[in-house]
Image: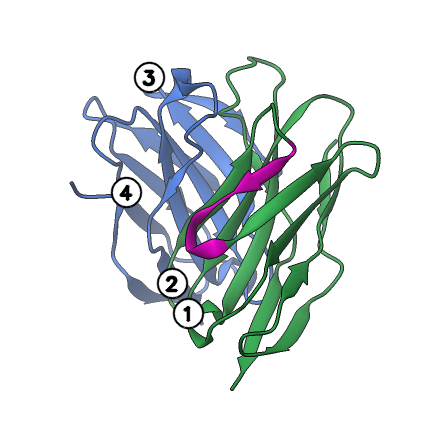
């Protein structure tokens, strides 16, 4: 059973450009959350999607947007990239009604470098 | 707002020695507590979780943690570490508000790098 799959694994972008990261959740999961992990820091919550809608959002600017598709996969879009957006972006899937008992399953992440 | 403090950024330990990684949290509501491990160039793997019930929680790879509500702590322990335990360890908390489903956002600490000395 495949876990959470993220693509691409690495990419390099130039300041001001736009980027799209992709995530396929673990089979049976219906909720996708995105986290940003800067070098040497813990992951920071960006937002969570359920039933194709943004359910919660962390303290990130509107340059960060997302989408969830009917098959539960998700995209994270970042516009007008800044050097400070360089980080590991983690996708986590879960089953909303599990009562938190199963926690999240994380992907291996996408390493974004902005130059 | 909830927060998590991991008091030690780096912990070096000799192989086969015991280890404790400290975690304190603050929250105005009931929480779920988690420990995750991150190996180099990988995502996060769940070690263990506290939801309710017994305050001593056992996880994978011989790790355990104890929830102490009065001290708002959730320290991670292992009686005998191995080289393979070298990794970054993150404590995380999840509020049970607003939906009480528990699948609310995770708030992470800044991590503790565990280094095993042969």
Of callouts 4 and 2, which one flags the residue occurring earlier in the amino acid sequence? 4
Question: Do the residues bearing badges 3 and 4 touch, measured as CB atoms within 8 Å?
Answer: no
Q: In 3D space, how far apart are the residues under numbered discs 1 and 3 (Cα atoms)?
A: 33 Å
Can residue A62 be seen in the rendering of this structure?
Answer: no
Q: Compared with residue A29, is residue B44 higher up or lower down, i.e. above or below?
A: below
User: At numbered mark 1, what does the secondary structure look like: helix, strand or loop?
Assistant: loop
The reply to the same-chain question for discs 4 and 2 is yes
Q: In 3D space, how far apart are the residues under numbered discs 2 and 1 (Cα atoms)?
A: 13 Å
Q: In 3D space, how far apart are the residues under numbered discs 2 and 3 (Cα atoms)?
A: 27 Å
Q: In 3D space, how far apart are the residues under numbered discs 3 and 4 (Cα atoms)?
A: 15 Å
Q: Where is residue B20 in the image (x, y as percent from the top left)?
A: 67, 60
- Select label 1 or label 3 by which is in front: 1
Describe residue B82's horizontal placement relative to residue B73 as left or right: left
Q: How crowded is mark 4: few (under 14 residues within 10 Å), some or many (20 or more)?
A: many
The reply to the same-chain question for discs 1 and 3 is no
Residue A11 placement: quadrant: bottom left
Q: Position of residue A109 (x, y in %)?
A: 36, 55
The residue that label 4 is drawn on is A23
Q: Residues within 10 Å of mark 1 (few under 14, many from 20)?
A: few
Q: In 3D space, how far apart are the residues under numbered discs 4 and 2 (Cα atoms)?
A: 13 Å
Query: Which color has been applied to chain B in this rendered view?
Result: green
Q: How crowded is mark 3: few (under 14 residues within 10 Å), some or many (20 or more)?
A: some
What's the residue at 66%, 42% (across, down)?
B66
Question: Do the residues bearing badges 4 and 2 touch, measured as CB atoms within 8 Å?
Answer: no
Instruction: Provide the residue span drawn in magenta.
Output: B55-62
The residue that label 2 is drawn on is A111
Chain for numbered disc 2: A
- Select label 2 or label 1 by which is in front: 1
- Select label 4 or label 1 by which is in front: 1
Q: Where is residue A58 in the image (x, y as percent from the top left)?
A: 58, 35
Query: Which color has been applied to chain A in this rendered view?
Result: blue
């Amino acid at each position: 059973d495949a876990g959470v799959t993220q693509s691409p694994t690495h990419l390099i972008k130039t300041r001001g450009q736009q980027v799209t990261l992709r995530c396929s959740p673990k089979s049976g999961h219906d909720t996708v959350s995105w986290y940003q992990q800067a070098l040497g820091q813990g992951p920071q919550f960006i937002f969570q999607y359920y039933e194709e809608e943004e359910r919660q959002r962390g303290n990130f600017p509107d340059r960060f947007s997302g989408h969830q598709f009917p098959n539960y996969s998700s995209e994270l879009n970042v516009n007008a990239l800044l050097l400070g957006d360089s980080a590991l972006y983690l996708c986590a899937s879960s089953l909303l009604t599990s009562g938190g008992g199963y926690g999240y399953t994380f992907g291996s992440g996408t390493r974004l470098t902005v130059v | 707002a909830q927060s998590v403090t991991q008091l030690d950024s780096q912990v070096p330990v000799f192989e086969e020695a015991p280890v404790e990684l400290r975690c304190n949290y603050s929250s105005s509501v009931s929480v779920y507590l988690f420990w995750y491990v991150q190996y180099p160039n990988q995502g996060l793997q769940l070690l263990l979780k506290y939801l309710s019930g017994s305050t001593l929680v056992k996880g994978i790879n011989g790790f355990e943690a104890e929830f102490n509500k009065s001290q708002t702590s959730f320290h991670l322990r292992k009686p005998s570490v191995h080289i393979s335990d070298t990794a970054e360890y993150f404590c995380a908390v999840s509020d049970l508000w607003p939906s009480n489903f528990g699948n609310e956002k995770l708030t992470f600490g800044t991590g503790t790098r565990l280094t095993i000395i042969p």
